[in-house]
Image (cartoon, rainbow, N blue to C red):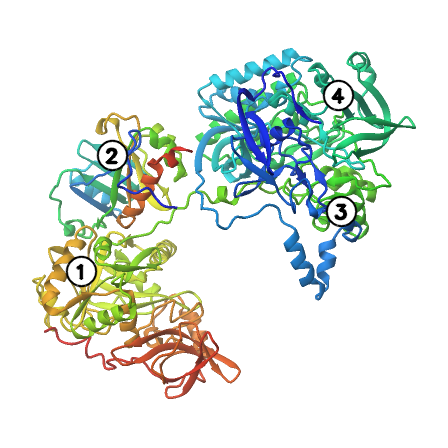
Amino acid sequence: MMRRLPRPVAGEWIDRSRPLRMHFEGREIEAFEGDTLTSALAGAGVMVTARSFKYHRPRGLVSAAGHDANNLFQVGHEPNQRGDQVLARDGLAFSAVNTHGGVAKDRGAIMGLLARFLPVGFYYKAFLGKRAFPWFERRIRNFSGLGTIDTEAPGSLRPRRHAHCDVAVVGAGVSGLTAALSAVAEGARRVVVIEEAAQPGGSGLWQARTRPEDHARCRALIAAVRAEPSIELLCGHSVVGCYADHELAVSRIDREDGGLTLQRAGAVVLATGCIEQPAVFHNNDLPGVVVGRAAQRLLYRHGVAVGERIAVLGANEAAVALALDLASQGLTVTDLMVPTGAPLDVSHHQVRLQAAGIRVHREVKQLGARADHTRALATVDFSSQGLEARINCDALLMSVGFMPALHLALQRGGTIRFDATLGQHVPDRLPAGMFVAGSANGCFGAAERSEDGERAGAMAARHAREAAARGGLAQASLESALATAYLATPDAGGAEVAGRATSPQSLAAPLFPSPAGKEFVDLDEDITLADLANAAQEGFDSVELMKRYSTVGMGPSQGKLSNLNAARQLAQVTGKPLPSLGLTTARPPWQPVSLGALAGARFSPLRRSALDAWHDEHGAAWMPAGAWRRPAHYGVNAKNAPAAIAREVAAVRTACGLIDVSTLGKIEVMGRDAAVLLDRLYTGRFAELAPGRTRYALMLDEAGTVVDDGVVMRLADGRYYLTTTTGASTSVYREMQRRVAEWGLDCVLHNLTGHMAAMNLAGPKAAAVLAQCTDLPLDAASFPYLAMREADVAGSPARIARVGFVGELGYEIHMPFATAPAAWEKLMSAGEAFGIRAFGVEAQRVLRLEKGHIIIGQDTDGLTNPFEAGMGRLARMDKPFFVGQRSLQALQRRGDRQRLIGFHLSAPRAPLAECHLAIDGDRIIGRITSIAWSETLGRTIGLALLTPDMAQAGRRVRFRDDAGRLHEAELVEPPFYDPDNLRQRMEAA
Amino acid sequence: MSLPSTARFVMPEDARWRVVGTGVRFGLKGSGAPGWLRSNGIATPAQPNSVQRWPDGRCLRLGHGEFLVELDAATTLPSLSAAEDGSDTWLLLRSDHCVLLEGDGWLRRLPLACSFDLQQLRDSPDLVVMTLFAGIGVTLIAEPATTTAGDAFALRLWCDASHATHLDHCLQQLASPLGDAS
């Protein structure tokens, strides 16, 4: 059983003077500050910490480094927290995920009895049948899934930080620390070292007694890095993704609510080390069966012994070092089992092993583990040199080989190759500015790792400096020069990496098939050797196909402990050499990262007009309008919003209303070719528009679809001012910029949307109100309908256009943002005597609907052309060119597919809304685009897009509401109100 | 997430900000703009994306022919029409919202909302940066220490006036303990 050692291990990361108490599924766990959840459980002797995903088998820690997904915990409302990384805190309560009734008595264990009915590819096979699918789907959904999402949990805001450095070093082992110092020595001013563990040092801090000189050197390295002001050390952070321009997504993993840092580097050094790979044998998933390095992590970091009687399955020099290291620290290591074919000549170590009391078993072939009543490892059965043997042990350490952690390089398009000499994959080609150091580069000795790190750090610093000098991005020539110099292979005519090991470090195939089965290749997904063999036999015989069919490597640990062994099994089944099979594609994230961390802080850049405060003070009920907020109506506390809207409508129809239209896009177009630009972008003619006049403008896209509208005002020769719809202001401005460049026009654009406020004064008394605030002559001769003027209004310079969107005498007044609030106040004061009322968007919608004026995007859709919207007359087809013109010519020949037409309901009121369908028998003939109750007209009116054959004035159609009831309506040609447009053209009184 | 209310919010000493007004602010566009500015006694930066400062004002060159000029004291400018005499020079209304950020604390807080490397502004004090901050477009320049309260780090930031409230909320959020917890 694992246990906390009573006496501290020199250099351990826990602080025994600061004890903590936590609760794991109701059981009190004593721990120390510096413990992880995993080490705390191990220290408390908890062997079974999890249940497997599929069969709910008892599981315990495997790597203590987050390379496996066994120790995933629910911490509060945060599911799937990695116990290997999350630090212990006093009072923390956590539990295993994926259990039914807790980890000790998981009712889900019944799934183990059904294993024979759950073959590889079960999902696909189950889902093939249409009848079976829903049945299986419900049960799988109910039964599976890791963790619990607490929908009642309060939203949390995790920091997402941007950071920059010259060189980022991933991994703070010996090679990473050396690389960081080397980069600084080479001139890098900002170096960041990112380390998953809570403290730096990596494996350099192990073997304190067996290799004290290396241990001391590592400590000195750490001290030097900590003392170097140019180096930032980020421990407890994991680089989960690597993106263009060396942007690293760095997730804080030592807390369950950790945030994300987007670290942009001039160059990157991957000193990510190797992932120790497990062996695959019968019951290799029992708690107590761990990779060798897990024992050293527990011991040196947390003062935890991995077991009372420890056996080692070892195939390389690291295994011997492991056994001797643990023994030197007083742990009882009883046996070293060396598999057949292991690249290890154990005779060189015989004397020391014997002195440590470790028995050596050579030529180990058969291997299997058994549990006792605690469900943890109790014995190991094996054959050695042809003889059957059994070891009583509570810990079996697997030290059979490595896989370099090069996933970040692979994410960026780097490649690896299988090095036959080394017996593992090594980097082949790396992305520009990315360098690999240490055991990930095949350098295993302490001195070699240090030298490799020094070289990589210096090259990274040079790359960053030269790339910055070239403008920030690495040049291709620089890329090839540096990458080739560093990574050139003999095949490419270069030299081999200095310091790379010259003998294999891994057992070629640590697979021990057993007639009893249950040799787990993938602990995440409970996938066995037999499953993979069956997948291959069913035709899924490439690594990518096998992955998708069997789901190997698709669990939370993303195949860190399974992909290589899965490929080895595939190689054995198919008889193909391992190097020819390759490995599956590496994609972000390298480690699990919570969606909350990815989301980060939420910025909702709401735009507010200059008059926002006035609206707020006067009870505006707000509604979103594109990026803005606008008053829907006034009287936010009014119990009867329709009545409030009706009052606002009535004020405009009978007296005067004032609405804030600052959200309209406002663009000034200047220069010799200003008219050319507008004539090409809009369907109308603007070159002939006289200064001081306005004209409605319709914009199409290349397909002839209506995309925007507005009003163009000609200020002077070569100077226009125009409005766009609220939602399209940015896109129209961008389109104009693009067109100016594309067409090479002599034209200057200025987006005034945020610089100008705008308000619309409308109603029969509008002129009378305006006259109180300006010296501008307002009589029909001086200021006719569709004219525009520049003058002072209420003390502010303004541009005034006589337009009539709401169908009354109206003035659209544009003025600087800063002066608008005072001007608005003055207009409201001046209008008091005339019954002025501020009106909101809802009233405006009713008013314009009564006039039959359409709203682009509401009364049109992504296919509506001007002919269908009843705006064909605005498309000047005789112009030489405008965007969408050629498409309109084709559309004219094709004919309409829909047509916009007005309607009024036969019944006074009906529960109809926009998008309700028009039905003719069993045929959908269109939909409502706008509908409102008109107090002015005393009926419900609307617009609808209908099929052309049905869109005939006088015809009766039926619209279907949400409840399926049909409501009859009569089609009419708009406008519904003032069809001769007399009111908006009326002479100013 | 609820933002800290203004009433309860205490501005930290190392991360202060204030809205700064100006006597005259205007934009200028067109190929004739540099000449027009020089003829009116306004020194222009030689390169785009750089700023020319003088004791009571500044001129930001936002492009080859685009400028933002601020004169801290109210000044009578040549009329608009004088700039529109056919010389391809266009005087433009600028209603930007402008704030001054002061204090070293911003160096660790601003990266929570902005991806730009602030070190570049320290290395190149005359740099003009147009970037995204908290989801909105902003223009940034480093502020010389002589014009601030002696802080080592100060920035002048312009954004669209319609984003003023959003900017204020975000700065509050960043200046709060949450913003410092990064």
Kind of residue sitting beneath label 3: Gly
Where does label 3 land, which residue? A112
Residue A21 horizontal/vertical position (percent): 55, 29
The residue to which callout 4 is attached is: A317
Closer mark to the observer between disc 3 and disc 1:
3
Please tell me whether mark 2 sits on a helix, a strand or a loop: strand
What residue would you read off at disc 1?
A799
Residue B52 numbered mark, or none: 2
Residue A894 pos. (x, y %): 47, 78
The residue most toward the right is: A386
Considering depth in this image, is A758 or A40 the residue closer to the camera? A40
Q: Residues within 10 Å of mark 1 (few under 14, many from 20)?
A: many
Question: Which residue is more in the foreground, A739 or A22?
Answer: A22
Q: Say which element carries label 4.
A: helix
How far apart marks 3 and 4 lie (CA) works out to 37 Å
Q: In the rendered image, which quarter is residue A10 located in?
A: top right
How many C-alpha atoms fall within 10 Å of the one at disc 3: few (<14), some, or many (≥20)? some
- Report whether mark 3 lies on the same chain as mark 2: no
- Badge 4 crowding class, 10 Å Cα cut-off, few under 14, some 14 to 19, many 20 or more, is some
User: What amino acid type is highlighted by mark number 4?
Assistant: Glu
| Label 1 secondary element | strand
A381 is higher (above) or lower (below) than A6: below
Quadrant in which residue A834 is drawn:
bottom left
- Secondary structure type for disc 3: helix
Residues tagged 4 and 2 counted as in contact (Cβ below 8 A): no
